[in-house]
């Protein structure tokens, strides 16, 4: 008895099938044709979700550099220029004149005009030496954001691999079903032609000929249905790669595959990472804990060093002369330490800390719930894999029966005790049973894909998974 499949499945599933490879299945063994690896590699280069995730990495890297800049001193240059029209009176300075004999005196105050134009260039350096741990917590959170962005890209690659793989295997299933429908139509046409001939010869009743004609009509309708299904499956396949693969016309090219189903499945299996959810939840929890440290910094003193230098230039004529009048003797420099302490804010900072702690506690509980949900989902999907495996076992039992009946019909035909119509009908049933196993095997592979790529965060939409600062 020929063997179609002989392979070891993940999860302890083993099965070997008694099948004679059809012309379509033989096509899957050819060197030429498409492979799942080619489809995934083509999709990766153009897929928008992957490109978006790369932009997220660039954004997160810039955020890390932005926070790191706070650890270095800053240097600012500013210039203030003024045009002044006011005059100052000095009340303590007066001039008086007395006229003798008249007893009369006159006084006059002295006025001094301020320069009309002034320039104040200033250079200031600042260095943050202690911020209560805020800057360090911000850097940690920015690094977590970068890790989340890298995780986002891995998730995008996983989602792309899952979508492409599922569409690829559904295309293979549609090809098998169409190939089977073509064979069934050919057999139904042969049977209808034979019935029509036998009716003309008077060897069968008209009802038998009508029955064959109805079967032929049914198979024609089935063929049209599977042709449309193949068209849809092929469109989904190209859409899953965002049209990165070249378009092919006709079933002969659309249904040409270079590898066996199991070989393609083994390739995508190596791309699977089932730890994405745990990593994502850990990043969220770590980022929330850094949020506590950021808010606690408001309750601690902050210290900054500063140094400044500024000069003054004055002129009654123009700004240019005011600028050229700047000299060292008129310059002013200063340096010092600024310490800031929040003495009273009506509990605002402490309430923010309490809120951040509550958020961490909520995420810890949500992480436990997510682990339980994941385990339940995994058990359900593994059950679906076992159910598809059981379906395959049932179909093999039916195939063995169909093969035995076909063998008997062949022997009867060879011995002259049977007829060709009966023998061909039994052979067609045997081939139909093989086709059902092919389809069931694809369903089994799709169920295994759901187990391999079961991450919940893969189903979220963009923008996603960037740890924002509180």
Image (cartoon, helix red, strand yellow):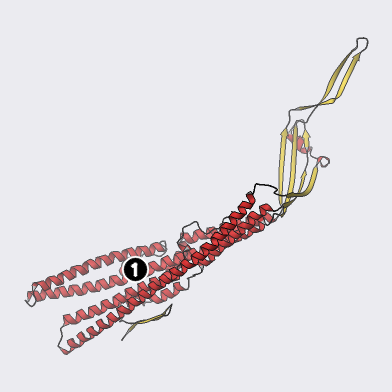
Residue lying at 27% horizontally and 73% vertically, measured from the top left: 180
Residue 56 percent across, percent down from the top left: 54, 58
Left or right: residue 64 compared with residue 306: left
Q: Residue furthest right?
A: 101
Q: Residue furthest left?
A: 202
Q: Nearer the viewer, residue 58 or 340?
A: 340
Residue 172 percent across, percent down from the top left: 35, 71
Residue lying at 9% horizontally and 72% vertically, measured from the top left: 206
Residue 450 percent across, percent down from the top left: 42, 69
Is residue 258 visible to the viewer in this orientation of the structure?
no
Q: Which residue is mark 1?
A: 254
Residue 24 percent across, percent down from the top left: 31, 75
Rendered image quadrant of residue 132: bottom right
Q: Secondary structure at mark 1?
A: helix
Is residue 391 visible to the viewer in this orientation of the structure?
yes
Q: Is residue 123 above or below residue 227?
A: above
Rendered image quadrant of residue 213: bottom left
How many numbered callouts? 1
Left or right: residue 459 compared with residue 1: right
């Amino acid at each position: 008895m020929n063997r179609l499949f002989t392979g070891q499945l993940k999860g302890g599933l083993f099965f070997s099938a008694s099948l004679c490879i059809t012309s379509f299945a033989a096509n899957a063994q050819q060197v030429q044709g498409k492979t799942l690896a080619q489809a995934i590699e083509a999709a990766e280069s153009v897929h928008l979700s992957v490109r978006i995730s790369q932009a997220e990495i660039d954004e997160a890297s810039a955020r890390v550099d932005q926070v790191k800049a706070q650890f270095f001193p800053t240097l600012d240059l500013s210039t203030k220029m003024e045009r002044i029209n006011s005059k100052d009176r000095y009340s303590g300075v007066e001039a008086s004149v007395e006229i003798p004999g008249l007893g009369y005196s006159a006084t006059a105050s002295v006025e001094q005009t301020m320069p009309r134009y002034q320039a104040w260039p200033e250079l200031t350096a600042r260095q943050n030496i202690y911020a209560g741990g805020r800057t360090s917590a911000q850097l940690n959170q920015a690094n977590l954001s970068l890790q989340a962005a890298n995780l986002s890209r891995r998730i995008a690659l996983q989602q792309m691999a899952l979508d492409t793989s599922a569409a690829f295997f559904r295309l293979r299933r549609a090809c098998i079903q169409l190939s089977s429908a073509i064979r069934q139509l050919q057999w139904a046409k042969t049977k209808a032609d034979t019935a029509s001939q036998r009716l003309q010869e008077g060897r069968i009743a008209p009802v038998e000929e009508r029955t064959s004609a109805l079967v032929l009509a049914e198979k024609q309708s089935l063929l049209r249905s599977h042709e449309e299904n193949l068209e849809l499956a092929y469109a989904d396949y190209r859409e899953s790669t965002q049209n990165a693969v070249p378009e092919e016309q006709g079933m002969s090219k659309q249904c040409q595959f270079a590898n066996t189903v199991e070989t393609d499945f083994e390739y995508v299996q190596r791309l699977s990472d089932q730890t994405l959810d745990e990593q994502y939840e850990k990043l969220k929890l770590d980022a929330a804990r850094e949020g506590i440290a950021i808010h606690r910094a408001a309750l601690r003193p902050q210290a900054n060093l500063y140094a400044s230098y500024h000069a003054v230039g004055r002129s009654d004529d123009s700004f240019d002369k005011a600028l050229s009048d700047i000299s060292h003797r008129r310059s002013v420099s200063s340096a010092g330490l600024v310490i800031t302490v929040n003495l009273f804010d009506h509990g605002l900072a402490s309430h923010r800390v309490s809120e951040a702690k509550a958020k961490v506690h909520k995420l810890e509980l949500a992480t436990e719930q997510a682990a339980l949900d994941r385990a339940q989902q995994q058990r359900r999907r593994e059950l679906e894999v076992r159910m598809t495996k059981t379906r395959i076992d049932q179909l093999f039992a039916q195939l063995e029966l169909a093969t035995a009946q076909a063998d008997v019909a062949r022997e009867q035909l060879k011995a002259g005790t049977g007829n060709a119509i009966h023998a061909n009908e039994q052979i067609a049933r045997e081939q139909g049973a093989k086709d059902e196993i092919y389809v069931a095997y694809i369903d089994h592979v799709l169920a295994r894909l759901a187990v391999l790529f079961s991450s919940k965060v893969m189903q979220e939409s963009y923008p996603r998974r960037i740890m924002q600062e509180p």
